Amino acid sequence: MARPIDPGDGVDLRPVIDPDPFDVRVALAGIVHWADSHQVRQRMMSAIAFPVADTSMFLVVNQLTYRGATKPSVLADALGTGRANLTKIANRLEAIGLVVRVPAPDDERSVLLALTATGREYGERISTQLREDLDEVLAHWSEQDVDALRRVLARLRHDAVGSAART
């Protein structure tokens, strides 16, 4: 059982960052945490009728939907998992026919994971469902506001990715 908080302990229950909804950090964190939540992933897997109840497998298909064929090491880094675990996930995806290993065109020693035709169908379902979800969220926004959001997010992505590449 937790002990009562003593003001002399220096324990402060407030967030470090003020929850101001107009603070870009707070807004971005809220969107990322929502999109990365277990609840959203489970709902998406259900909506697209993903063939297995395995979030890690879904996340690999999702990454390949956006990236195209990718080295397993890159996927492991993107998903924050080890390479051995990614190999196990890839084996399971290959067994159900969603991915295939192909030689990397620029390095004969490397392989890429690529979506099969069936895997691409699930990728298309993910894309369609995301479009529908966004359309629902933005349904009450004006066309001008949606266009402004597109421009600002594209610029933010460009600058953030460029900054990350320089470090």
Image: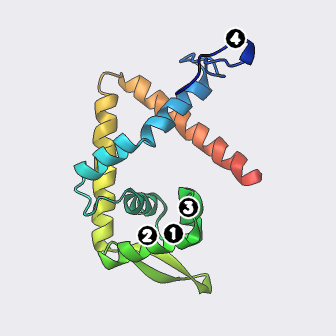
Marks 3/2 in contact by CB < 8 Å: the verdict is yes
Q: Nearer the viewer, mark 1 or mark 4?
A: 4
Q: Residue furthest right?
A: 167
- Lower sequence index among marks 4 and 3: 4
Give the x, y percent position of residue 70.
52, 70
Mark 1 belongs to which amino acid? Asn
Mark 4 belongs to which amino acid? Pro
Structural distance between the alpha carbons of marks 1 and 3: 7 Å
Structural distance between the alpha carbons of marks 1 and 4: 45 Å
Q: Which mark is residue 81?
A: 3
Mark 3 belongs to which amino acid? Thr
Location of mark 2 (residue): 89
Structural distance between the alpha carbons of marks 3 and 2: 10 Å
Structural distance between the alpha carbons of marks 4 and 3: 40 Å
Q: Nearer the viewer, mark 2 or mark 4?
A: 4
- Lower sequence index among marks 1 and 4: 4
Side (left or right) of 110 relative to 53: right
